[in-house]
Image (cartoon, coloured by chain):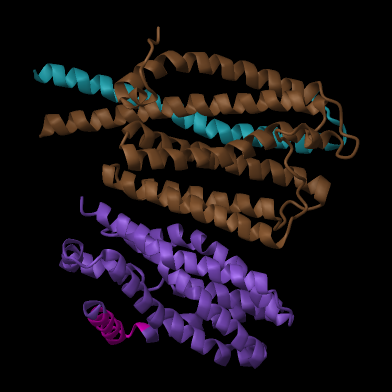
Chain colours: A cyan, B brown, C purple
Amino acid sequence: MLDFGKYTFEVLISYVGTFSLVSIVIVSTYFDAKKVKKDLKNLNIDILNDK
Amino acid sequence: MIKFRKNIWEFANPNNFLSIANKIVPLFLILTIITLSVGLVWGLFFTPEDYRQGSSVKIIFIHVPTAFLAINIYFMMFLASIIWLIRRHHVSLIAAKSAALIGLIMTLSAILTGAIWGKPIWGTYWAWDPRLTSFAILLMFYLGYLSIWQAMKFSDKIGDLSSWLCIVGSIFALLSRYAVFFWDQGLHQGPSLSLDKEENIDNVFYFPLIICIIGFVLLFLTLLLIRIKTEIQKRKINILLNARDG
Amino acid sequence: MKLNFHLLKYELLFALANKGILLSTSFFIILILIVGIGFGQIGESSEKTLLAIIWIAISLSSLLSIKTMFQEDFDDGTLDLYVLSNTSIETIIFIKSIVHWITTNLPIIILIPLISFPLGITIYHSILICLVMLLSTPALSFISTIGAALTLGEKGGNLLISIFILPTFLPIIIFGMKISLLIANSTYDIMAHLILFALSLICIAITPFITSLIIKIHYT
């Protein structure tokens, strides 16, 4: 199925390379957002407790 | 629903921005997935081979969108920095900061796919061709902009400094680009897309390419919105911590 | 005007007393020799590589003492007085850049014929290259003030300055190297010379204003 004639390797490696590069941003964005959301929640709870 | 607003600057209020971003992000996410998968699958499996370049022409469907984004993200950072310096809207500064990493990755993938494509067609991974050199220059300015945020802690002062760095960087990136093009027109083919139809590539490649570009732009916008949201929340945490600890 | 002249004299004397000239010239000579020896080991010692080495060495050495340009004045409060006083900071930045150019780049440019002659560039060509450098390197000093202003008060400033400023030297380096290559090939392109000098003059005209805006950020 993944056969593009003479340049199969080049085509596949460029797609895979780009996706791995882009996934660095996606993963870091996702985990950053998750962590900050959790921190904000904890902080709000802390502040409520202090009151 | 999003209610009608008087002017665009009201989005500069972080709270307005957050409420709208929360509604838009899921929509953008779905659109990104649809357009990218349609464009890339169309490009990979349903396009013929080029008579000269063979199947290696399929690399165009990621090479052109990433190169397009790499240049335009820097331009967006330039505009956002100017808006921050003139109108002092924090969302604008945060947008410039959040876009930089995505721009760097896009530049890297444009260079990577270009190198892989260049080997079978030109016989070399890298040549000091003007277009390739201008991407190397762009990469350096992205690294400079990112390193100012890495080296210093977030504050309005660093925001000003980084905005000036971005503006100076764009001026000199443009100057270097024309300095390179002054001497040599290079072996890279001309622009694949332009508004006047004559120069354009064949329709068979044109439509999937347009869909891919839209897909990548949507991907960038989605990531950017999420990153801006995260950054605003980070600043909120800082403010809350400062308020609590005095 | 009189005040500016005094400032120029003071800055020059201060730079000379700090032995800036000795440091920059020895850095330049060591850099040229190290890179030359390195290229010699792989059998690559043509006139072309020597030209490239000279341009890269001169752009690296113009970053040498840039960090101290505003830092000392910033630390002891002189810069505060400059910002508060009637004299425009632009003038002070202009004077400081001129002094920086006189103490770091000018001695190097005078040295170039002496170094390049034994290494294989003819005297006539090296003097022409010196003239090109004389007209284009002031821009390097002026541009690097932007880096000095950006990293005011930072501890790891020297590394940051090279990251920010070296890419901005590119237009000057590209044109300078191409023109040197043309000179080495005994051909002349008047257009390229004019563009190089125009670039240099634009940098000299604009950078003091940008730098002063950046310095003012530290005082708001």
Provide the residue span drawn in magenta: C5-20
- Relative height, residue B173 to residue C131 (above, below): above
Residue B76 in percent (x, y) is at: 49, 37
Q: Is residue C167 left or right of residue B80?
A: right
Asked if the magenta segment contains residue A39, the reply would be: no
On the image, which quarter does residue B51 sit in?
top right
Residue C197 appears in view: yes
Task: Name the residue furthest top.
Answer: B1
- Relative height, residue A37 to residue C90 (above, below): above
Residue C178 appears in view: no
Residue lying at 24% horizontally and 54% vertically, measured from the top left: C218
In front of the other: B152 or C62: C62
Q: Which quadrant: the N terminus of chain C?
A: bottom left
Task: Name the residue furthest front.
Answer: C1
On the image, which quarter does residue B236 sit in?
top left
Asked if the magenta segment contains residue C17, the reply would be: yes
Residue B96 in percent (x, y) is at: 42, 38
In front of the other: C219 or B220: C219
Residue lying at 56% horizontally and 52% vertically, measured from the top left: B174
Residue lying at 70% horizontally and 33% vertically, measured from the top left: B195
Q: Magenta-highlighted stretch: main secondary structure?
A: helix
Residue B72 in percent (x, y) is at: 56, 38
Residue lying at 15% horizontally and 21% vertically, measured from the top left: A47
On the image, which quarter does residue B48 sit in?
top right
Residue B95 in percent (x, y) is at: 41, 34
Number of numbered discs on residues: 0
